[in-house]
Image (spheres, rainbow, N blue to C red):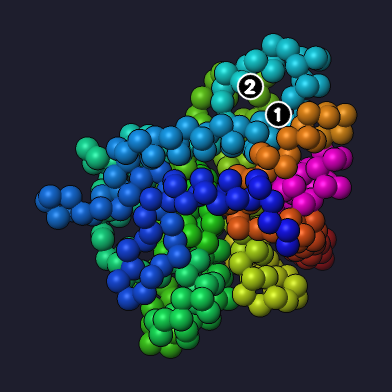
Amino acid sequence: TKHSSIDSVREKVAGIVNESRMPAKDYESTVGIYGGQIKYNKEGKMVFDMQGIVSKADRFGDAVLRTYDEHTMRQPLEMLKKHPKLFFAFIKAGTKRYRGSPEEISEHINELGLGKYYGLHADGIEIKKPELFTDGIALQDIYRADEIASEKLNDIDRFQALASASQYARQVHKTGHGAGELLSSDIIFEHKNEDGTVENPVLNIPDIVYNKDIKQKVETYQQDDEAMARDQKATDMLDFMFQIGVEELRRSEDWSQVERALETIIENYDDKDVIEWVRSFSKRGRLTLVGDKEVLDEAKKGDAMAQKTDKVLSQHNKARLNTQTDIEGKLRQAVIAACDKYLDQENNKSSS
């Protein structure tokens, strides 16, 4: 694919804010650490250190890009003209999710039941079980085993790992909260068995938090608490499905395997209400992907500014998902098709 000047800028920025990598001891992990660095302090504790200037700049830039990307305002010019008060209320409320402060991340850790793994520290977040990062195996590294070429990864069945990760996502969501961001880099398996299966998935540091102020600041926000929780869960799963689709296509170069991966996620996550929202989000143009021109033009119909800025502002998702413009439209259709297949099956069960 053509390498644009925007791509070059994106890669340079990613190289700066990616301050370290997951410190796996048996191989060089592909999992980048953003918003801080993994360090051992003087007391020998492993800490996600969030004090540096790069970390602070990354948190600011992340929030700015997400404000657009989350479709907080799908047609900003139209909203400004027709509902100016609501427009400024949304601006004031900020993004739906963002990279949190240490205190916010600590609160999120406790909400998700991860207190035995992580906790608040003066420098950021303490990793209470360092072996999770040194001995654990990230789902992303399983998908990139062909590039890493480590014996520890070579015999792992990525579809078994994906099924386990998807079941775990459902368990996380039973806390009533979204993870904040759910990518293959966000799930780490504590154990690998002799038969090559992996187990005991754990969330990576949940440093992306949902904005709890949106409902209070935007009085016309039409979601109750249950709907807001479902919105968070669907946002997590939409991220996960798109990114796994990208990883699988890179690995297998086979769209039928992409379909298999998406169906594996949905079948093992197995929450009809959330999958309905994932399908709805995807049909409406989320995630923002510049290669998906037909969907985006329809989603932002009548808003020339939104259409013109897609190419720049979609770079956030391009960096997060590692996607390429020429596959984005087909990937969206694959996500929708996988949701349709599952929902049709569930509806048939209900009617029989």
Can residue 299 be spotted in the picture?
yes
Q: Which residues are magenta?
A: 274-299
Tell whether position 283 is magenta.
yes
Residue 341's x, y, as percent? 79, 64
Q: Are marks 2 and 1 in contact (CB under 8 Å)?
A: yes
Measuring 36% from the left and 55% from the top, which residue is drawn there?
20
Measuring 42% from the left and 81% from the top, which residue is drawn there?
150
Residue 42 placement, left or right of 189: left
Residue 238 placement, left or right of 113: right
Residue 208's x, y, as percent? 47, 42
Residue 303's x, y, as percent? 83, 28
Residue 267 position (above or below residue 159)? above
- Among all residues in the image, which is located at the extreme top? 85
Q: Amino acid at mark 2?
A: Phe
Can residue 287 be spotted in the picture?
no
Q: Secondary structure at mark 2?
A: helix
Q: Work out whether residue 216 or residue 57 is closer to the camera in this orientation and state it.
A: 57
Residue 114's x, y, as percent? 35, 51
Measuring 66% from the left and 39% from the top, which residue is drawn there?
313
Residue 93 is marked as: none
Picture quarter containing residue 268?
bottom right
Tell whether position 195 is magenta.
no
Which residue bears the numbered disc 2? 90
Which residue bears the numbered disc 1? 73
